[in-house]
Amino acid sequence: IFWLAASFLIGAVIVLIPCIIVITRRSDDCPVQTTISTTTPSGTTPPVPTSTVTTSSLPTHLTTTSSLITSPLTTTTMTSTITTWNASDYQSNSDYYGSLANPRDFDQSDNLRLDRLSSPRFHPINGKSIIYLRRQYHMPDLRGSTTTLHWLDLETNQTVPLTRPIWGVHDQQFFWINNTILFLSNRASTGLNQIFQLTLPPDVSQLTSFIDPIQIIDYPLNIDNLLVNRQASRLAFSCQVYPNLTIGETANQHTIEKASGRSIYQFDKLFIRHWDEYMTGPRHHPFLVQIEQQTNGIFKFSSQPIDVLFNLDSDSPTRPFGDAQTQWSFSATGNSFAYTRQHDEMSSVAWTTNLDIYTVYLNMSELSSVCITCENNATDTDPSYSPTDDDILVYRSHSVPGYEADQYKIKVYNGSNTTITLLDDWDRSIQAVTWSLDGQSLYLEIGEQAENVIYYLSNIFTDQSTTLIIRNGTSHNINLHPIDNQTFVFTYESILEPANIYLYSSNDPIRSLTDHNKNLLAKVRMSTVAEKFSFSGAQGDEVWGWHVPPANGTSSSAPLAFLIHGGPQSSWYNAWSYRWNLQSFSSQGYAVIAINFHGSDSYGQNFTNSITGEYGTLPYEDLQLGLTYALNNFSYIDSNRTVALGASYGGFMINWIAGHPEMSARFKTLVSHNGLFDMRAMGYSTEELWFTEYDAGGFTPWDNPDAYEQFNPVNHVANWTVPMLVIVGARDYRVPETQGISAFTALQRRNVESRLLYFPTENHWVLNPLHSIAWYEQVFDWMNKWAS
């Protein structure tokens, strides 16, 4: 989605010395299992109580239909036999919060110290254990992190860390081959990402030390992505290579360029830059290779890797956020490989959203890619082969060219150029698809009223009936049991609970499997309630929002943090965030109101589409009415101490509000993070041009200037009077830094009290932990100055 600002963390950049410039002037609940058989969620929004409350005071797992749900932060107790956490290369974090005598208010430093759990996967033979990834940050100062592999016994709930934690080392993208795990890691002596293997002992529960993995390949470039097919012993990986050059030749070219002492970029087409990097030549290319296990148990490449895109100036996975887990797929036998790439290699990649899916049949003397989606000029992505039939794959597809927020539908391709659309009358986007073991049914992740829920689709070939099986909160990363078609593990999070790993079985209550953050969460105070409310918004439509009261209660009046999300076609989900975290605001004594205005996703595609051409009307009216509703219905909020904050499109809305006194007068101060200031200039300087052009009716700035001027904050600067904090990331190429600098210049020139917070090394998001803490410190310092 365009100006993303408030949802999920993509990664973290660790920089040891914070680099920030300040310029100033003048004075979630747990997943609820359900067996509700549902009709397709089409047309209208499913019926939901006018106000639902998420709280952490009730026994949740017994709750299947109530709107009151809980966050079981301590329902699981894990044990481990390994006690060597104080090795010289690793400082134990386990007692950091245990030393605190009394709970204190949760803040962003606590948020960033939370362990981050992801990618649970069953043992492929018996399914009695899982492996998952655990990312930990250095507790005292957050100047380092490490990601390691962990094993968990599902019968005893015993957990064992497998790989040694070393600051700066990250294990990722792992795959089972029987009792061996292949994974990517930068443990190599070169510091580059390479492929490693780790073989489990017969009884993992008896491990008393870490397993030292074995590096199986040593390339002069980073290996960025990995995918393994166990049955055919085939492997796909990606490196960034120059078109027409091999891995070795690309590495030599890097050496030549470095030795030249020159730093000059030449461009003959777009993209010049994308997200936060300049597109200087190397491209993500997938390589296919055969592997075999030697008599000593160590895997090796048994063929020369083949560059699938050898001479193409294109990327797979696609930039900036594509990954092999979603955009690549091996067929069950390993004889076919599917991948996503941009259809075009020319400048039009900057103004079209046309991604296509290609298939390669591997049992041929020469590889040849076949495009199976070229008739569609919109996005086709995320191919996934059937586990039982090499000729069948599903993928997600848009139907509107140039519109990144279009509804994703599921397509089924049967190998003979025949494609069908599943659930064609649904009006919700499919976020992810997981095959069941039988090759006939699917598990679907769907955004539905700001919750990421899971549906079961019983048969793609017959009735396509669906059942809602997990509701509330955000559930994702499904991994199916290798034997039981009705059992899977997944990650779950909410506004009240950071991500944990859960086990779903159709015959048993959902249960949490992890509690790594128990000690930390027991020592901090957070809000225990996240309330979902609705009101009559623009055009009389029902609009929803979140209310999170201050962690210290509502017995006395409290200031308001009025949060405006980016996207704009995204939402404030019932999810945890390591950036814009609602708990980080409520724990500082602020009431939090977050409105999902017209244009937000998960409320039906018509609601999402309604923002097109209406940037400054429908969402603006929703925010006005939502603020009024909150002040009238949550009486403890002090209407004289209100602050509005927004990022990306939310920053645009802050700038728009600043120019409209009927709304700006309702706030003591404003905070605009990477916000759009001049829409016409944006049309010439952003990188993904399809955003500005689609929302301008398909016009460029020179074809129809009025389409860009209609809702342009720069035209209303003469009305700016409310103090504002402006935040800019220098490596933000989505909303270039000149937008924020221009806004600050306007404020200063108009003698409006203002401050510029400038991050030279951050992009559209603030990812460095030290910078993130400084961001919150500066933001709260500014908010408290005006609203305390």
Image: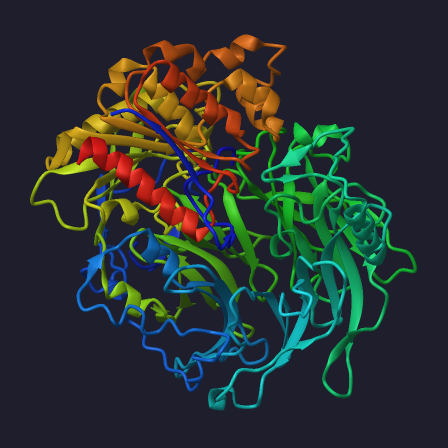
User: Residue at horizontal 78%, vertical 28%?
Assistant: 268
| Above or below for 187 versus 415 | below
In the picture provided, is 236 more to the left or to the right than 68? right
| Residue situated in front as seen by the camera: 38 or 119 | 119
Q: Quadrant of residue 717?
A: top left
Residue 234 placement (x, y as % from top left): 75, 68
Which residue lies most toward the right here? 365
Q: Quadrant of residue 375?
A: top right
| Residue situated in front as seen by the camera: 95 or 82 | 95
Numbered circles on residues, count: 0
Residue 777 placement (x, y as % from top left): 31, 44
In the picture provided, is 649 more to the left or to the right than 558? right
In the picture provided, is 654 more to the left or to the right than 8? left
User: Residue at horizontal 44%, vertical 41%?
Assistant: 20
| Residue situated in front as seen by the camera: 283 or 635 | 283
| Above or below for 295 versus 455 | below
For the question of whether residue 73 can be seen, the reply is no
- Position of the C terminus by quadrant: top left
| Above or below for 757 versus 390 | above
For the question of whether residue 742 can be seen, the reply is yes
Which residue lies most toward the left here? 555
Which residue lies most toward the front here? 261
Residue 706 placement (x, y as % from top left): 52, 8
| Residue situated in front as seen by the camera: 287 or 716 | 716
User: Residue at horizontal 80%, vertical 52%?
Assistant: 255
Colour convention: rainbow
Residue 390 placement (x, y as % from top left): 73, 60
In the picture provided, is 190 more to the left or to the right than 276? right
